[in-house]
Image (cartoon, rainbow, N blue to C red):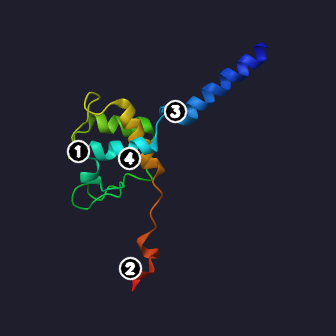
């Protein structure tokens, strides 16, 4: 019985490390709504594709940032983007936005789009 408890505990610890602290309940569907609600799309494009004018072309989808770094940046940025404190953008909504951005399929390289290469 003791070994079983240890295995379950270790499995839970490993799952926590793999998930990187992102709330397990984070929802890409809710994140898409929150992305619109909090105005992220105004600078970062409707699907996080970035804009050369408003976000210096910064693409939010396909990010390599772990959730903790993403959240820290959103909460404390001192760059062109204003910081979004927890009372303005709740932690659950931020986790959902991150889940949405991770769920958006990677866009094809423009060089592979035949029409653009004619």
Residue 2 rendering spot, x and y as whole percentages: 76, 13
Secondary structure under tag 3 reads loop
Residue 69 rendering spot, x and y as whole percentages: 39, 38
Residue at x 66% of width, y 21% of height: 9
Residue 66 rendering spot, x and y as whole percentages: 45, 40
Q: Which residue is mark 3?
A: 24
Q: Relative to 74, is 8 on the left or the right?
A: right
Secondary structure under tag 2 reads helix
User: Residue 7 has which mark?
Assistant: none
Q: Gap in Å between the C-alphas at discs 4 and 1?
A: 19 Å
Q: Which residue is mark 4?
A: 32
Q: Nearer the viewer, mark 4 or mark 3?
A: 4
Q: Nearer the viewer, mark 4 or mark 2?
A: 4
| Contact? badges 2 and 1 (CB < 8 Å) | no
Residue 16 rendering spot, x and y as whole percentages: 56, 29
Residue at x 38% of width, y 40% of height: 70
Instruction: Report crowding for label 3: few under 14, some 14 to 19, many 20 or more residues within 10 A (C-alpha).
Output: few
Q: Which residue is mark 1?
A: 81
Q: Which residue is mark 2?
A: 116
């Amino acid at each position: 019985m003791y070994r079983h408890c240890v295995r379950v505990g270790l499995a839970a610890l490993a799952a926590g490390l793999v998930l990187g602290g992102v709330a397990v309940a984070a929802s890409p569907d809710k994140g898409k709504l929150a992305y619109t609600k909090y105005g992220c799309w105004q600078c970062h494009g409707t699907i996080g594709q970035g804009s050369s004018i408003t976000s210096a072309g910064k693409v939010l989808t396909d990010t390599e940032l772990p959730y903790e770094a993403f959240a820290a940046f959103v909460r404390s940025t001192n760059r062109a983007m204003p910081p979004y404190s927890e009372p303005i953008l709740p932690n659950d909504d931020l986790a959902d936005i991150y889940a949405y951005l991770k769920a958006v399929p990677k866009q094809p390289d423009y060089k592979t789009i035949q029409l653009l290469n004619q």
